[in-house]
Amino acid sequence: NDLDNGLYTVLWTIMGGDGHKGEGDFTFTLKQSKPNKHANHH
């Protein structure tokens, strides 16, 4: 499914082979224009 325009936050967690846990996050904004109905689709 496509994402709607807006602000998104991704939370991630990883477990290393040695048992060390890492985690973090990042945020992004999606701003897509609506497709032009006259656009040539292939």
Image (tube, rainbow, N blue to C red):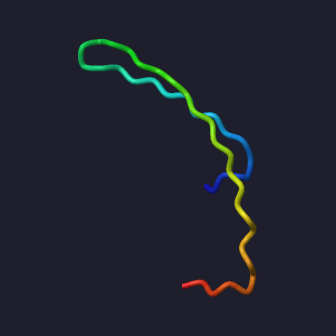
Q: Quadrant of residue 42?
A: bottom right
In which quadrant of the rendered image does the N terminus lie?
A: bottom right
Q: Is residue 36 above or below residue 40?
A: above
Left or right: 2 with respect to 24? Answer: right
Kindly identify the residue that appears in the image at 75 percent across and 68 percent down. 34
Judging depth in this view, the residue of 26 and 17 nearest the camera is 26
Kindly identify the residue that appears in the image at 75 percent across and 82 percent down. 37
Point out residue 27 in the picture as x, y percentages from the top left corner. Answer: 62, 36
Left or right: 33 with respect to 18? Answer: right
Point out residue 39 in the picture as x, y percentages from the top left corner. Answer: 68, 84
Q: Looking at the image, how many numbered discs can be counted on the residues?
A: 0
As drawn, the residue found furthest toward the top would be 19
As drawn, the residue found furthest toward the left would be 18
Point out residue 16 in the picture as x, y percentages from the top left corner. Answer: 30, 20
Q: Quadrant of residue 17?
A: top left
Q: Quadrant of residue 2?
A: bottom right
Kindly identify the residue that appears in the image at 38 percent across and 15 percent down. 21
Kindly identify the residue that appears in the image at 66 percent across and 52 percent down. 3
